[in-house]
Amino acid sequence: MPSVTEPLRLIFLDIDGVLNSWWFMRAIGSLWDSDNQADDLDPDACARLERIIVETGASVVLSSSWRLDTTLASMEQMLRARGAPSARVIGATPPPWAGSRRGHEIQRWIDENAHVGPVVILDDDSDMAHLTPCLVKTSMEHGLLDEHVARAIELLKGP
C-alpha cells in the first residue's frame, strides 16, 4: 500500500512589516543599519510566529525580498535565534518577474510543489491577487500582532 503524505500547512512569510516594524526599530534605536540581520527581527513578533507554528505545525516559505540575499538555512537560524525555535524554512518563492505580484510568485511556488495544504500569507502588502483570502495583513508600523496570530491559526486549521 502506498504511503500517504500529509498535506503541508504553509506560512508564506514576508519579513519587513511582519517580523520587524517602525515601532520596533524606533524602540531599539536602529533603522536597519545593524551588521547582523538577525538584530532586525523583533523577538516579540518572532515569538508570535512561533505560536502559529506550534499551534498548527506549519512550515515556512520565505516570500520576502529577504529571499533574494539570505539563504534558507540562514533565515531559519535567525528565526530560531530570535524567538521562533520551531521554525522550519522549507523554501522560497521565485524571484519577481515583469508584471508579477507577490500572489503570483506564491502561486507559482504552490504549483511547483506537491502536498500543499492550507496556507496563510503574512505580509504588510496587499498584492496577493487571487490569494487575498489567504492574506493576514500586518502593518509596517506595528508588524505581527496577537490578532494576526489568531487569524493565521484559523486559516491554517481550515479545511
Image (cartoon, rainbow, N blue to C red):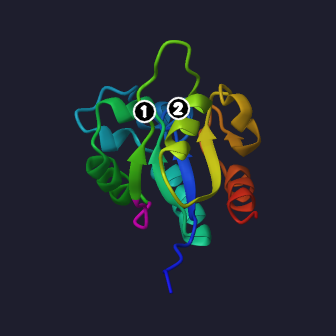
* Distance from Cα at disc 2 to Cα at disc 1: 6 Å
Q: Residue at x 49, y 81 (%)?
A: 2
**Residue under pointer 1:** 94
Residue on which the image places disc 2: 105
Residue situated in front as seen by the camera: 9 or 112? 112
57 sits left or right of 147 in the view: left
- N-term-proximal mark, 2 vs 1: 1
Q: Position of residue 10 (x, y in %)?
A: 56, 55
Viewer-nearest residue: 86 or 140 = 86
- Neighbour class for label 2 at 10 Å: few (<14), some, many (≥20)? some
Residue stretch rendered in magenta on the structure: 84-88
Q: Is residue 140 visible?
A: no
Q: What is the magenta segment's predominant secondary structure?
A: loop
Q: Amino acid at mark 2?
A: Glu
Tell me if residue 17 is in the magenta stretch: no
Q: Which of 99/143 is in front?
A: 99
